[in-house]
Image: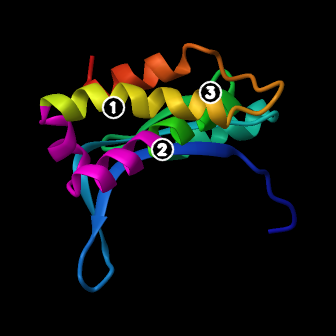
Amino acid sequence: MKRGKIVDSAIYITSSYKEDYSIRQEGRFARIYIGSDDADATKKVYGILNHPGLTCCIAENITVEIWRKFILNCAYNVLTAYYRTSIGGALSQLHGRKNSGLSCRKPMTSARPPASPCPTTSSDDQYDRILGT
């Protein structure tokens, strides 16, 4: 390839690894948000990736989607480590559901860079995504 194009992405998939370190999809869905300053490259990647089994979305602002993914990962990592279980196991407990809201809000208040395009409602958006509401 003489010249390539970069299309940024944020991928949502629930997976785990086995004893042999192979990866296994755990969840029922896989979703990817893509975006770039190059609209043609983004549309081409969308055409390749969007198919049954993988939902591909062109993000209005990929930086916002990447921050949303960061917030979600922070919440998932805290909850799964604290409860020593999967995210489904943590959220099945009443106190796990309550703590997921706190886990989403903390990254927004402590790690948000100056001039970030991430809206202040992102932590609430992610809390709703975690709970499936």
Q: Is label 1 in a helix, a strand or a loop?
A: helix
Q: Residue furthest bottom?
A: 20
Q: What residue type is labelled 1?
A: Ser
Residues at marks 1 and 3 touching, judged by CB atoms closer than 8 Å:
no
- Where is the C terminus found, in terms of image quarters? top left
Magenta span: helix, strand or loop, mainly? helix
Dot 3 alpha-carbon crowd within 10 angstroms: few under 14, some 14 to 19, many 20 or more: few
Q: Which amino acid does label 2 sit on?
A: Cys
Q: Earlier in the sequence, mark 2 or mark 1?
A: 2
List the residue tagged with mark 2. Answer: 74
Q: In this view, does 10 lie to the left or right of 2?
A: left
Q: Earlier in the sequence, mark 2 or mark 3?
A: 2
CA gap between label 2 and label 1 equals 10 Å
CA gap between label 1 and label 3 equals 15 Å
On screen, 45 above or below 96?
below
Q: 30 or 103, which lies in front?
A: 103
Mark nearest the camera among 2 and 3 is: 3
> Can you give x and y, in whole percent of width and height, for residue 129 in the image?
36, 25
List the residue tagged with mark 1. Answer: 100
- Membership of 40 in magenta stretch: no
Q: In which quarter of the image is residue 61?
A: top right
Q: Is label 2 in a helix, a strand or a loop?
A: helix
Q: Give the range drawn in magenta.
A: 74-93
Give the residue drawn at x 37%, y 25%. Answer: 101
Q: 108 or 1, which lies in front?
A: 108
Q: In which quarter of the image is residue 75?
A: top left
